[in-house]
Amino acid sequence: MDTFTNKARTVPDDSAKDRAKLAELINRYAPDDGYYDLPLPGVHLLKASSDTMQAARSMTKPGVCIVAQGAKRVIIGDDVFEYDNSRMAVYSTEVPVSAKIIKASQQEPYLCLAVDLEPQKMAELCLKVFPNGIPKVQHPRALYIGRACPKLVDAGSRLLEIMSQLDDAEFLQPLVVEEIFIRLLRSDIGPLVAQIVTADSNMHRVSKAISWIREHYKEAMKVDELADLANMSVSSLHTHFKSVTSMTPLQFQKELRLHEAKQLMLTKMIDVTTTSMSVGYSSVSQFSREYSRLFGVSPSKDARTQVIV
């Protein structure tokens, strides 16, 4: 297992005020533990007042995470990533992850601001930030960790300050979000992030394949047709797809089906047999085996737990 040792580090004194301000704003709009979708489109908050005892499995989406307090560990396949208030995390595509909060308390909860990436806007900004062309990246990944500079943290605070002036949000939010994207592209991981929206990059091609699987996860998949869609050879698709997701396309589809099944049972309270067929399984027993292997509990028991909760 590869560990990306971007671990918790002491925050420089000159950035402490910026992070304290961001923490105060996140606390204001996330008063209790949980995940919040704000009235500002594409802006989210996460708060946790204790370490996570058991890792939670979920699907990510492209976005930048700016941590004001605490620390988090994310596992994608065999790769382990850690980030805290000195490091930002940029998710490049949708991918299944296992995540734990590893530093949080009632006094100092884990506080995170997440902003969805906007591919079209990012592509426009790449032309300005990299006028001579974007440096090539050999090994694209689903998650990049970089230094969260004070100016980026400050921009995050100004984005949340718009919450107190929602009448002007339509005009102010795009300006602050554009600044966040520019500072992201000009950061130490900027060339990596730019690959997400570069049409001829392997990252972009893999993301195109992932989007197709995401939209057609119930259907039988032919890898050669998926490779054609991504404008790659089958061998190249396998290589780069696994580099990004730590899975083959078929493994990715299976895990996506299981995540969708869990969400169905959580939100619609439907039985296991109906759920398995709804996500593309023809065998309920196979569905139950694979669900239990991924989540550590049988779907029937999980469904009963969701009803109780």
Image (spheres, rainbow, N blue to C red):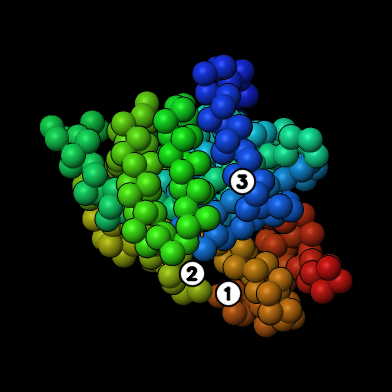
How many neighbours does mark 1 have within 10 angstroms: few (below 14), some (14-19), or many (20 or more)?
Answer: many
Judging depth in this view, the residue of 180 and 272 nearest the camera is 180
| Quarter of the rendering containing residue 126 | top left
Q: Which residue is mark 1?
A: 279
Q: Foreground mark, 3 or 1?
A: 3
Write down the residue under mark 3.
26
Structural crowding at the residue carrying mark 3, measured as other residues with C-alpha within 10 Å and reported as few (<14), some (14–19) or many (≥20) = many
What distance separates the C-alpha of mark 3 from that of mark 2? 35 Å
- What residue is shown at x 67% (from left), y 82% (from top)? 274
Earlier in the chain: of badge 3 and badge 1, it is 3
The one of 58 and 174 positioned closer to us in this rendering: 174
Give, as a three-letter code, the residue at label 1: Val
Q: Is residue 5 left or right of residue 168?
A: right
Q: Report if the CB atoms under discs 1 and 2 are less than 8 Å apart.
A: yes
Sequence-wise first label, 1 or 2? 2
Residue 217 tag number: 2
